[in-house]
Structures are given as structure tokens and as C-alpha cells.
Image (tube, rainbow, N blue to C red):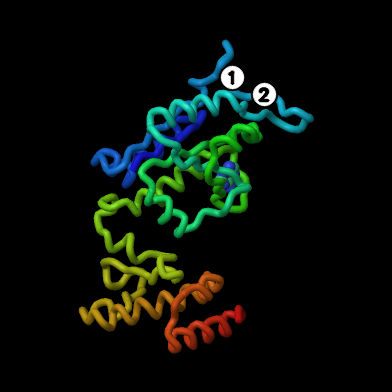
């Protein structure tokens, strides 16, 4: 999987993604991440890439031409028209299914805006997907791009040590993950649930599934409509919703 990130702050992106699990996957050659500096495509002697918006208004806009030239150089190197994700609060909100779908691509290009955004005309020409990471406004698209690269990378085979953890995870089934415990058996007077010490795998699975349903009903009842529940689980979820006043 090859990620290209068009940005004015390449070190920010590379420092973050060269760390921890994504960093190890890059070292192992499972991923490649390249931050491309849009400023390298500035076309004036001041190396500036921004200008005032026509019609007035606060702040500066990134100009179309440097972004276009940066994209064009990438397209030539990749050898085809890649998928280009523009990070913007105006895009579709990022979710796990989108990460799964994007993980199927061989190359992905992310375009990070700064200042008040980017000249609309170049967006119309190069962007294939507009994505937001949530209903809040950040100073630039770098953190959202890093979040998306992280979420997509962990779905690439071999990136996680243990493929089971990519399989069963929060949201996979539209249920949140069950609570987990490690040693010691008692911590701050709190005992690990007995069933987890029993070695009885079927009972452990049953307990975990039940805890997932309870957690989802308590914390994210909106997910329940898309979860596939047995009749018994539906009754349990309804009981939790009633108890928590969310029914
Ligand atoms: N750029 C600024 N805010 C953003 C957000 N919430 N999501 C994606 N890109 C952004």
C-alpha cells in the first residue's frame, strides 16, 4: 500500500507516521508513506503558495497552480489517475467501512489544505473523495490524513501482529469491543471477572458477546440498529436502554 500526502508540513506527517505500528510497517516494507511538499511547486520567487480570496473575506487561500503541479508530478510517477482524498470538514464523515474500502486501493493520495482552504477550481479537477474526520474544525488536513492512514494501514495484511485483532474490533459488527483485563487478578480491590479465568472458551465467548451488547446499548445505542442481534440479545439491549433512560 502506497500513501502519498500532499502537504505544506511534510515533517509533521512523517514524524507521526514513522512512529509505532505504522513506523514498523514502513520499515518492513508493508507500507510506504511519502509526504510531498506542495511548496516545492511554488511558482514565484518568494516561494509562496497562498493568496487573498476574490470577493474578500478572512484569511488566505492556497492557490490552484502549486497544488495542481504537485498532483500532476505524482500522477506521472504513479502512472495512472490515483484516488485523491481531500481532507475537509465539508466531506463525508470518515468511518470504518470507508477505511475498509480505501484499504483495497494500491495507492492513495491525500491532499491537506491550510489557511482558509484551497482554490475550488483545482479541487474540481483532482479530488475524487472529500472526507471529514468529524464535526469540528482543525487548522489543517495533516492530522486528519494521519488518522486515515493509521486506520487504513492496520487493515493491510501483516501490519498488526495478530490478524484476529483487526478482525474483531469495535464497529466491525456494529458492536463495541468487550472489556479486557490483564495481570494481576486483583487490582485496586477489583477482581477480574471469574469467567475469564475459567479457561472455558465457549463461556468466555458468550460473556464477551454479552458485554459487547451491553456496552453498545450504554455508550453507542445508535449503532444497535445496524447490529445483527439474536432475540435474547435484543431483549438485553432493550433492558439496558430502559435502565439508562435511552429507550
Ligand atoms: N480540516 C480541518 N478540519 C477538518 C476535519 N474536521 N476533517 C478533515 N479535514 C479537516
Identify the image quadrant of the C terminus. Answer: bottom right
* Res 231 quadrant in image: bottom left
Using the image as rendered, state which of residue 87 and residue 203 is in the foreground: 87
Identify the disc placed on residue 51: 2
Residue located 55% across and 24% down the image: 66
Q: Residue furthest top?
A: 45
Identify the disc placed on residue 219: none
Residue located 54% across and 40% down the image: 127
Q: Residue 72: give x, y in percent of width and height.
A: 48, 28
Residue 115 visible? The answer is: no
**200 shown above or below 155:** below
Q: Residue 151: give x, y in percent of width and height.
A: 41, 51
* Res 123 quadrant in image: top right
Q: Judge the density around disc 2: few (<14), some (14-19), many (≥20) Cα neighbours within 10 Å.
A: some
* Res 230 quadrant in image: bottom left
**94 shown above or below 78:** below
Count of residue discs:
2
Residue located 60% across and 27% down the image: 64
**156 shown above or below 126:** below
> Alpha-carbon distance for marks 2 and 1?
8 Å
Dot 2 lies on which element?
A: strand
Residue located 61% across and 47% down the image: 89
Residue 129 visible? The answer is: yes
| In the displayed structure image, the side of residue 3 where residue 144 appears, left or right | right
Q: Judge the density around disc 1: few (<14), some (14-19), many (≥20) Cα neighbours within 10 Å.
A: some
Q: Which residue is mark 1?
A: 48
Dot 1 lies on which element?
A: loop
Image marks 2 and 1: residues in contact by CB distance under 8 Å: yes
Q: Residue 185: give x, y in percent of width and height.
A: 27, 72
- Asked if disc 2 is less than 8 Å from ligand 1, the answer is no
Using the image as rendered, state which of residue 45 and residue 83 is in the foreground: 83
Amino acid at each position: 500500500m502506497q500513501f502519498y500526502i500532499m502537504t505544506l508540513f511534510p515533517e509533521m506527517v512523517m514524524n507521526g507516521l514513522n512512529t509505532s505500528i505504522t513506523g514498523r510497517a514502513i520499515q518492513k516494507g508493508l507500507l510506504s508513506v511519502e509526504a510531498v511538499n506542495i511548496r516545492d511547486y511554488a511558482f514565484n520567487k518568494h516561494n509562496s503558495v497562498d493568496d487573498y480570496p476574490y470577493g474578500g473575506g478572512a484569511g488566505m487561500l492556497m492557490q490552484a497552480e502549486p497544488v495542481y503541479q504537485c498532483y500532476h508530478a505524482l500522477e506521472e510517477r504513479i502512472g495512472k489517475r490515483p484516488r485523491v482524498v481531500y481532507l475537509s470538514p465539508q466531506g463525508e464523515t470518515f468511518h470504518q467501512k470507508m477505511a475498509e474500502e480505501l484499504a483495497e486501493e494500491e495507492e492513495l493520495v491525500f491532499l491537506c489544505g491550510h489557511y482558509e482552504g484551497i482554490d475550488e477550481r483545482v479541487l474540481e479537477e483532482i479530488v475524487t473523495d472529500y472526507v471529514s474526520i468529524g464535526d469540528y474544525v482543525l487548522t489543517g488536513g495533516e492530522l486528519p490524513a494521519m488518522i486515515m492512514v493509521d486506520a487504513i494501514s492496520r487493515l493491510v495484511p501483516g501490519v498488526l501482529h495478530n490478524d484476529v485483532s483487526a478482525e474483531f474490533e469495535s464497529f466491525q459488527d456494529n458492536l463495541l469491543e468487550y472489556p479486557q483485563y490483564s495481570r494481576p487478578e486483583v487490582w485496586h480491590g477489583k477482581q477480574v471477572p471469574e469467567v475469564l479465568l475459567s479457561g472455558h472458551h465457549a463461556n468466555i465467548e458468550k460473556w464477551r458477546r454479552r458485554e459487547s451488547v451491553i456496552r453498545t446499548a450504554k455508550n453507542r445505542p445508535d449503532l444497535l440498529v445496524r447490529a445483527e442481534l439474536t432475540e435474547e440479545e435484543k431483549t438485553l439491549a432493550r433492558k439496558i436502554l430502559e435502565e439508562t433512560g435511552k429507550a
